[in-house]
Amino acid sequence: MLAIEFDLFSFANQLSTEERRITLLEAIGLTVVLGFCIFAFVVRRLREQSLDAERRAEVDAEIEELRDQAFRDVLTDLPNRRAVIARLKAIDPADGRSRAFFMMDLNGFKRVNDQYGHAAGDGVLRVIADRFKRASRPSDLLGRLGGDEFAVLADDVDEAGATALGNRYLDALRNDVWVEGVGHRVGVAIGAVLVPRDCRRAEDILANADAAMYRAKSFGTSALVLFGDPEQPDVHAHG
């Protein structure tokens, strides 16, 4: 644009004839104008690159936020079922580490919804999620699978460690859950599997933990069942 405004093309064409001689003043002026044109072009390109970088950063941030939302439970702000399954699928059974996976289903939660409404039920779920967070280790993955089901994936845990950790979740619901001045008695049935001892694939981990959880559910009270021989379950029950 500057070249057109100052008619530099016509000036350069005149310089190409043998009759035209450039003066020192014209050479200085031409150098200044060309330098200014180059400077303006560089500044504009840098500004465009900066704007492009800002737009890319905004887009990347939006994509990251959407990805985080896709793997997070809105009510409890815990990882959701999709996030838990993704972690299970990422387990490498050959890495030599022993893990425990817990599937937890609440006892008595339906009564809360039926008697006090879903708003009270949501409040109970948030309180329970906070209690489970406090019972979990910083390295554990605590997630909400949906409804009144939660799950925990704990790394570097053997059978004794799984039992101890499972009992911490039982203890988390030993006392009533208070929401808006009302105390609710809610228990939990926990099924646990050891990986890779009991199973390796994500599908099997979920299925076996679910089976153990339903055995725990049959006791009618808060209970922890480790996956194994259904005739001789390892049960730790809390009244």
Image (cartoon, rainbow, N blue to C red):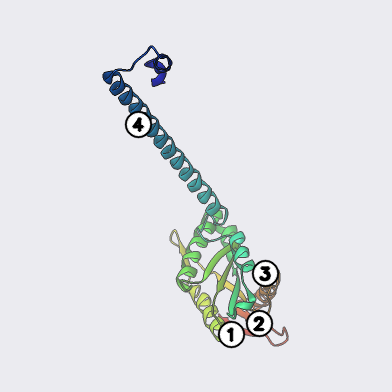
- Tell me how far mark 1 sits from mark 3, CA to CA: 19 Å
Q: Residue at x 53, y 76 (%)?
A: 170
| Mark 2 or mark 3, earlier in chain | 2
Extreme residue toward the front, this view:
18
Q: Which residue is mark 1?
A: 159
- Can you tell which quarter of the image residue 192 is in? bottom right
Kind of residue sitting beneath label 3: Ala
Q: Which residue is mark 2?
A: 197
* Labelled pair 4, 1 in contact (Cβ < 8 Å): no
For label 3, count other residues whose C-alpha is less than 10 Å away and answer few (under 14), some (14-19) or many (20+): some
Between residue 36 and residue 59, name the one nearer to us: 36
Extreme residue toward the top, this view:
19
- Tell me how far mark 4 sits from mark 3, CA to CA: 60 Å
| Mark 4 or mark 3, earlier in chain | 4
For label 1, count other residues whose C-alpha is less than 10 Å away and answer few (under 14), some (14-19) or many (20+): some
Q: Position of residue 179 (x, y in %)?
A: 46, 61
Work out whether residue 109 can be spotted.
yes
Q: Position of residue 122 (x, y in %)?
A: 53, 57
- Can you tell which quarter of the image residue 88 is in? bottom right
| Mark 1 or mark 2, earlier in chain | 1
* Labelled pair 1, 3 in contact (Cβ < 8 Å): no
Q: What kind of element bears circle 1?
A: helix
Kind of residue sitting beneath label 2: Arg
Q: Position of residue 143 (x, y in %)?
A: 55, 64
- Tell me how far mark 4 sits from mark 1, CA to CA: 70 Å
Kind of residue sitting beneath label 4: Phe
Q: Which residue is mark 3?
A: 202
Q: Say if 27 sits above or below 112 in the image.
A: above
Q: Say if 76 sits above or below 155 in the image.
A: above
